[in-house]
Image (spheres, helix red, strand yellow):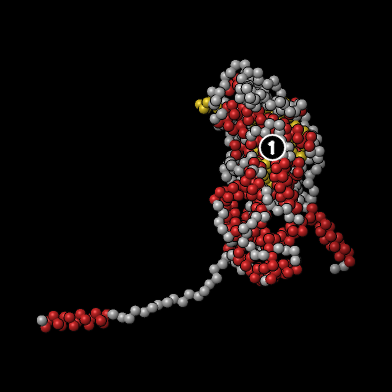
Amino acid sequence: MNRKNFITKSGIALGGGILAPYILPSGRLFAKTGTLKADHVVLVMFAGGVRQQESVLGRYLEDSQGVSGAAGNIMPNLFEGNSPTKKIAYGTSVVGKPNGSEPIPKLLTNSLERSGLLFPEMRAQSAGHYVGLNTLLTGNAGTNQGLKVRPAYPTIFEYLRKHAGLKATDTWFIGNGIGNSTPLLNSSNHQDYGLAYGGNMFAAPVTFSNAGKEILGNAKTYSRSDLEPMYHMKNFLDQSFALTKDQISSVSNTDEEKSQIKDFIKSVFTKQQSGQLAMPPVTDNGDALNVMYAAEVLKEFKPKMLAVNISGVDSCHSNFTGYLQSLHRADHITGWLWQYIQNNIPQMSGNTIFIVAPECGRNLTPNPILDQNDWVAYDHSDANALRVWGLMAGKGVPSLRVGGESQPVGRLTDIVPTIADVFGILDDVKAAGLIDPLAQSLYNRI
Amino acid sequence: MHNFKLSLILITMFTLGGCTKERNIEFGVDEARVLEDKSRKTKKKNDAEFVSILYTNLYQTAISPNQLYKTQNVVYSIGDQDVANEMLLSNYFNTSGLTIPKDTDMRNDIESFVVNTFKRFYLRYPSEGEKAFFGQYIKTNPNVTVEMVYTAFACSEEYQYY
C-alpha cells in the first residue's frame, strides 16, 4: 500500500470510528431538527368514551335526558361556554346539599379551546376502547387489532425512538391500570420496530399502590460501586445467552436510565409517605391519581413524549350521573396537568405541545339502565360513537376552531402524524407506510 | 385303579417338569446427571413462574398465592421488566428469612460457590469459561458479595427461560 492510499484509508477508518456511535437506529446520522415545532409533547387520552353532546357541544342533560333548559358546558378548562344552571349533579358533594351539586372551580384562566386549536368534529375509526387507544398511539385504524396483544403497528414511541433517536426515558406511557391490555400500549410487536424501540411505561395506580409499596418500596438503594459489578456479571451472562429480536420482552433502558427509574419509584413512595406529591385540587378518583403520577414522571424525566390514559367516564354504561362527574373531573385534571407543566417544570414550560383527544365517542340512543337520578345510560357502538373532537395547545399552536358539527375535519389517526410533525419526522413515519393512508398532520388540516 | 395311578404319576411328572427356577433379573442403569442445557431453554417463564421460582429459590419455601398475585401485578405494571425484577429482588434482599450462603462461605471456596450458583439458578453446570470468569472476578474484586452475584444471575436473560 502506498503512502497516499494508506492516508486515505486511515482517514476513512478514523472518520467512521468517530461517526459510527452517532448513527441513529434508522441509519441517519442526525435527527431531523429543521422543522422541530416543540421539544415536548404531552398527549391526554381522554377519557373512556366521551359523547360529543355532553362535551364539546355543551348540551349537558338537554340532549341525553330530554331536560329542557339544562344545556351548558361542564368542561370549563377545555371548552368555552357557560355552565349549566339546572339540575347540577356533576360536581363535588357538600354536606347539606344534593350530591354533586358543587362544580369544581375552573383552574385555567383561558380554556384550552381559547388558547389553542380545536377540531370540534373529528372521526374515530373504532367505537371500542382498546382499538381507539391503539389508533391514538399508532395512527393506524387498527381494524385487525386483537385484545391482549401488543399493537400490531408501531406506536409513536417507537417512531420517535427509531427515527428521532430518542432514548427510552424520553418516551413514556402512563396507563391507568393493568386491565384491558393497557400495559401493552408502550410498544407494538411490529417486526421493524417493537420493544427495542418501545417507550417506558407505568400502570401508575398499580405501581404506586399499597402492594407496589410493599413489593418495591423497601428495595435497597445501591450505590454506583455496588451496581457496577452486578451489571458487569449480568452482562457477561447475557452475552452467552443472546436473545433474538423476537425474544425481547421488555423495554430496554441503559444502566443509567434504569438507576434513574428505580430512584424515581422510591422517591414517589417517599413523597407519598410525607404527603409531598403534587396533586389536582380534587383527587377523588383513579384518573386523578394517574394524572398526578404522570406529573411526577414529567417533572423527573422531562420526556420528549408522554401519553397518559384516563378512563373514568366509561361508567356511562350504567351510571349517567357518574359519567357526568367523571367528565367534569377529567376536565379538571387535564387543566391541572397543563397548569402544572407551565408552573412547575421550567424546562417544559413554553416548549410543550399539549394534545387532548378521546379514543372514541358514545351512542346517540341510550340503553335502558337508569341511575340514581333516573337518567338513562349510554354504551358505545353506533355512528355517534365515532364522533370525537381534538384539542391542541402550547408552543406555536394557533388559536383556531377548525370544522364544525356539519363539517367534520380530522381523524383520530391524525394524532400520530401530528406528533411526528412536531418532532420533524413526519416524512419518515409516512414512508414507513404503516399509518392510516388518510391520516394527516393536524397542522395540514388547518 | 391302575389307570388312576398312571395318571397321577404322569401329572406329577409334567407338573414338576414344567417348573423352572425363578431368576432375578436386574437391568443395569448407568447414573446420569439430569440437568438443563442452555441451548434448550427456549420457553420464557411467565410473570407468575418467574416470581414463584425466584421466591422459592431465595427463601426455600413456596410463595403464598396472595403474595404471588400482588407481586405479579406490580411487576407487570412497569414497562422495563429488568427494573421491576431488580427492585423486587433488592426488596427480597432487604428482608430476613433468605436461605443464601454467607460471603465468607463464598470466599472460602469460590469454585464450589460458582458451581452451586449455576446449579441453583440455571439448573446446569457452568462451562469452563464461565467458571474461570466468575472465579477470577470474585477473587480479584473483594467487594463482590453473594447478593451481587445472585442479583446478576436472577436478573440475567437465561434465568427468564426454561
Residue A80, picture quadrant? top right
Q: Residues within 10 Å of mark 1 (few under 14, many from 20)?
A: many
- Which residue sits furthest top? A69
Instruction: Pick whichever, A92 or A34, lies toward us.
Output: A92
Identified at 60% across, 64% down, the residue is: B120
Front residue of A171 and B130 = B130
Q: Give above or below for B21 relative to A407.
A: below
Residue assigned mark 1 = A291
Q: Is residue A369 left or right of residue A425?
A: left
Vertical relation: A106 (above or below) A40: above
Q: How many marks?
A: 1
Q: Residue at x 69, y 67 (%)?
A: B104
Callout 1 secondary element: helix
**Which quadrant of the figure has residue A240?**
bottom right
Q: Is residue A350 visible?
A: yes
The percent position of residue A77, horizontal first and vertical second, equals 71, 28
Q: Residue furthest left?
A: B1
Q: Residue A234 placed where, x, y %?
A: 69, 60
Q: Which three-letter amino acid code belongs to the residue tagged 1?
A: Val
Vertical position of residue B139 compared to residue A429: above or below: below
**From what the image shows, is residue B69 above or below residue A289?**
below
Please state which of residues A424 and A295 is positioned toward the viewer in this rendering.
A295
**From where the camera sits, is residue A413 visible?**
no
Q: On the picture, is A340 further left or further right than A184?
A: right
Question: For the point 70% across and 47% down, which residue is it?
Answer: A265
Q: Please state the chain letter of the residue tagged with numbered disc 1 in the rendered image.
A: A
Image check: A10 left or right of A171? right
Say which quadrant the C terminus of chain B sits in: bottom right
The part of the image, by quadrant, that contains residue A298 is: top right
Q: Position of residue A350 (x, y in %)?
A: 80, 35
Who's the residue at 67% across and 65% down the image?
B102
